[in-house]
Each structure stands twice: as structure tokens, then as C-alpha cells.
Image (cartoon, rainbow, N blue to C red):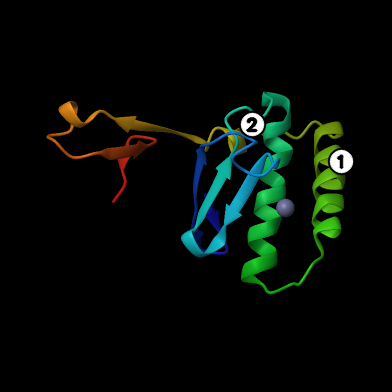
């Protein structure tokens, strides 16, 4: 997903416990958005909207308080959903993170995100 020209990778990785109770996290320096594996499917779209807002906040140095980001997430999600806007292409960009066993990867541990090999 491109955000302000930056190519973000979006993955389901870790649990909400791993994320300190959050459903997602934006690692803007690594251009990566992480969505908790145990996040309810119904929550994924608004969580992704939230993390996009976090990325915009960081890259544009908007200095929005977290409460502002949460309010924008809820407001945008409600207006767009109630207007019948199809947001499913957003969540289709979420890749699965899976680790390829060493014996299948020529002796090295590699991880694949959406079919793409990670360094
Ligand atoms: Zn946040």
C-alpha cells in the first residue's frame, strides 16, 4: 500500500497481547503496518484506517494526539461504511506472515510476506 509515496507492507503478525493490547501498530520508520492475528475481521478495516492515519501523522509531522487519531478513525469508518463505500480492497492488502521451515529453505530461516521473501 502506498502512503505518501512510501510503499508500506501490511501484515497480520503477532497477537493483541504481543502488541500491548492494541489491534495494530504502524512502524513508520520500517514502512510496515502490523495487524494483530486475533483482531476480529470486523475490526480489521477500521484498525487499518487507524494505522494509515498514524502513518500520515508521522510522515506529515501533524502532531495529532492519539485521541484525535482514534476519533478520525471512528468518524471516517462510520461515514464511509454507512455511505456504502467498499473498503474491502484495503484489507485485501494485508499479507500473511509465515515462516518457511529451515529444511525447505536451504538451511536458512526465511519469512515470506504475501509471497515476497524478506531480508
Ligand atoms: Zn494508534
In this rendered view, identify the residue nearer to me: 115 or 40. Answer: 40
Q: Which residue is mark 1?
A: 79
Query: In the drawing, what numbered circle is on residue 88?
Result: 2
Above or below, comparing residue 24 to residue 96 in the picture: below
Provide the secondary structure element on which disc 1 rests: helix
Distance, label 2 to label 1, CA atoms, is: 15 Å
Per the image, label 2 sits on a secondary structure element best described as: helix
Q: Tag 1 or tag 2, which sits nearer the N-term?
A: 1
Q: Residues within 10 Å of mark 2 (few under 14, many from 20)?
A: few
The residue closer to the viewer here, 97 or 76, is: 97
90 sits left or right of 43 in the view: left
Q: Position of residue 59 (x, y in %)?
A: 61, 69
Q: Which residue appears at 32% of the width and 41% of the height?
A: 116
Q: Indicate whether 8 appears above or below 4.
A: above
Residue 114, x across and y down, in percent: 39, 35
Q: How many marks?
A: 2
Residue occupying the point 62% across, 27% down: 38
Q: Determine the residue positioned at 33% across, 32% down.
A: 99
Disc 1 crowd, CA 10 A, few/some/many (<14, 14-19, 20+) = few
Where residue 95 appears, as percent x and y from the top left, is 47, 35
Relative placement, left or right, of 29 versus 78 is left
Q: Quadrant of residue 45?
A: top right
Residue 115, how many percent across, how many down? 33, 35
Give the side of residue 47 with respect to residue 117, left or right: right
Disc 2 within 8 angstroms of ligand 1 (CB): no
Amino acid at each position: 500500500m502506498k502512503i505518501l509515496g512510501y510503499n508500506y507492507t501490511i501484515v497480520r503478525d503477532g497477537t493483541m497481547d504481543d502488541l500491548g493490547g492494541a489491534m495494530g501498530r504502524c512502524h513508520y520508520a520500517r514502512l510496515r503496518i502490523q495487524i494483530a492475528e486475533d483482531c476480529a475481521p470486523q475490526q480489521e478495516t477500521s484498525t487499518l484506517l487507524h494505522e494509515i492515519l498514524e502513518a500520515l501523522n508521522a510522515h506529515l509531522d501533524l502532531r495529532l494526539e492519539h485521541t484525535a487519531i482514534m476519533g478520525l478513525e471512528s468518524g471516517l469508518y462510520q461515514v464511509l461504511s454507512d455511505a456504502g463505500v467498499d473498503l474491502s480492497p484495503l484489507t485485501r492488502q494485508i499479507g500473511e506472515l509465515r515462516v518457511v521451515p529451515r529444511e525447505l529453505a536451504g538451511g536458512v530461516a526465511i519469512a515470506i510476506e504475501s509471497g515476497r521473501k524478506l531480508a
